[in-house]
Image (spheres, rainbow, N blue to C red):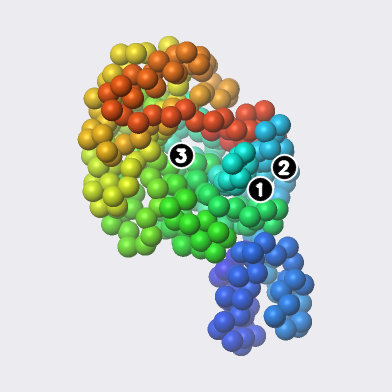
């Protein structure tokens, strides 16, 4: 819902100031039409239905994976594509993966989104409308900014969306912002006065040479500088930094690389590693086998670095980590 347009229409009608909050409360609870908003005057409901669409995104198509994961492909009012994903877990969690940009300008070599043409940042309303789409299906309780784009390149809109996510049932402690290591954004998050969300760092290599091959942004923000920024964030926010590490066969999954990663991630109370099985894209990479992933995980744990293996969701509909590219 375009909140600025809503405010404009309400002001034109000289409606009481509380009307915007009423409309938003209904939307956050999953209302699918203005007709459901029974505490609004009928004439106002008619006007809003004509002038303020419930979503500023158009739904182009949806796909449902065998594991219950659901992907939605949207387009903005100016025709920019983006995707969002609802992940349903057996323990009852319902997590929405949100995009912050249409495309991504940072061209990580293993990520399908990086092959798209970058369009623009999304507005806070466009980010929220991704979540609201799924809220109309069922309640949500987690959100991750791990869809299309680098969230810290669009931090104002991302934080504005985060301020409203609790109205949907998503607490700040259940919201995670992922970054490739955009240091100015990490420092802004550390100083931000609002509630503390979780921070995840896409790392994917234990040395600068390899990380620059995989992630060109490393040439601008080298590995040690990024980790120092994460430590500053932890010192201010007192929460662990989640380190995302994509397991690529023969590239970054050797035992020696696990030892190098363990040496980097100190002190031990700052970081927790999330090992991510590689999900196929059009790149030439292959995923590490289960045995290699387990050896890597054990090497980290033995050296005091907590490490888990991410459960892959939605791979069969190109909805898993790194697969979003605005296609079927």
> SS for tag 2?
strand
**Sequence-wise, which precedes: disc 1 or disc 3?**
1
Q: What element carries label 1?
A: strand
Q: Can residue 11 be seen in this view?
A: yes
Q: Mark 3 points at which residue?
A: 105
Percent across and percent down for residue 202 are 40, 34
Q: In this view, does 299 lie above or below 10?
A: above
Identify the residue shown where x is 50% and y is 46%: 144
Left or right of 253 in this view: 167 = right
220 lies left or right of 41: left
Which of discs 1 and 3 lies nearer the camera? The answer is: 1
Say whether disc 2 or disc 1 marks the residue closer to the N-terminus. 2
Which of 274 and 34 lies nearest the eye of the viewer?
274
SS at circle 3: loop
Which residue matches tag 1? 74
**Which residue was labeled with disc 2?**
62
Residues at marks 2 and 3 touching, judged by CB atoms closer than 8 Å: no
* Image location of residue 257, percent across then percent down: 32, 17
Residue drawn at x 37%, y 13% is 254
The mark lying in front, picked from 2 and 1, is 2
Compared to residue 313, the image places residue 207 above or below, namely above
Say which mark, if any, is on residue 213. Answer: none
Q: Residue 301 or 130: which is nearer the viewer?
A: 301
């Amino acid at each position: 819902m375009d909140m600025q347009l809503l405010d404009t229409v309400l002001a034109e009608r000289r409606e009481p100031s509380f009307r915007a909050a009423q409309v938003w409360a209904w939307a956050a609870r999953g209302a699918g039409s203005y007709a459901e908003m029974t505490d609004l005057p009928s004439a106002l409901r008619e006007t809003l239905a004509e002038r303020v669409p419930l979503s500023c995104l158009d739904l182009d198509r949806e796909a449902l994976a065998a594991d219950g994961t659901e992907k939605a492909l949207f387009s903005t009012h100016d025709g920019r594509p983006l995707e969002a994903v609802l992940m349903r877990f057996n323990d009852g969690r319902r997590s929405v993966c949100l995009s912050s940009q249409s495309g991504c300008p940072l061209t990580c070599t293993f990520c399908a989104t990086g092959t798209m043409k970058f369009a623009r940042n999304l507005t806070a309303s466009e980010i929220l409308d991704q979540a609201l789409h799924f809220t109309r299906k069922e309640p949500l309780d987690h959100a991750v900014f791990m869809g299309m784009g680098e969230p810290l390149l669009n931090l104002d809109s991302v934080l504005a969306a985060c301020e409203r996510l609790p109205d949907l049932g998503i607490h700040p402690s259940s919201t995670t912002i992922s970054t490739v290591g955009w240091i100015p954004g990490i420092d802004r998050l550390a100083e931000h006065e609002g509630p503390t969300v979780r921070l995840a760092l896409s790392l994917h290599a234990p040395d600068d040479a390899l990380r620059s091959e995989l992630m060109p942004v490393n040439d601008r923000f080298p590995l040690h500088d990024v980790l120092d920024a994460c430590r500053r964030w932890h010192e201010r926010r007192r929460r662990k930094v989640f380190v995302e590490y994509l397991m690529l066969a023969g590239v970054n999954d050797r035992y020696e690389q696990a030892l190098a990663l363990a040496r980097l991630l100190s002190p031990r109370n700052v970081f927790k590693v999330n090992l991510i099985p590689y999900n196929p894209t059009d790149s030439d990479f292959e995923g590490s086998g289960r045995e290699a992933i387990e050896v890597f995980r054990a090497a980290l744990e033995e050296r005091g670095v907590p490490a888990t293996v991410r459960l892959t969701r939605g791979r069969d509909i190109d909805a898993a980590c790194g697969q979003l590219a605005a296609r079927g």
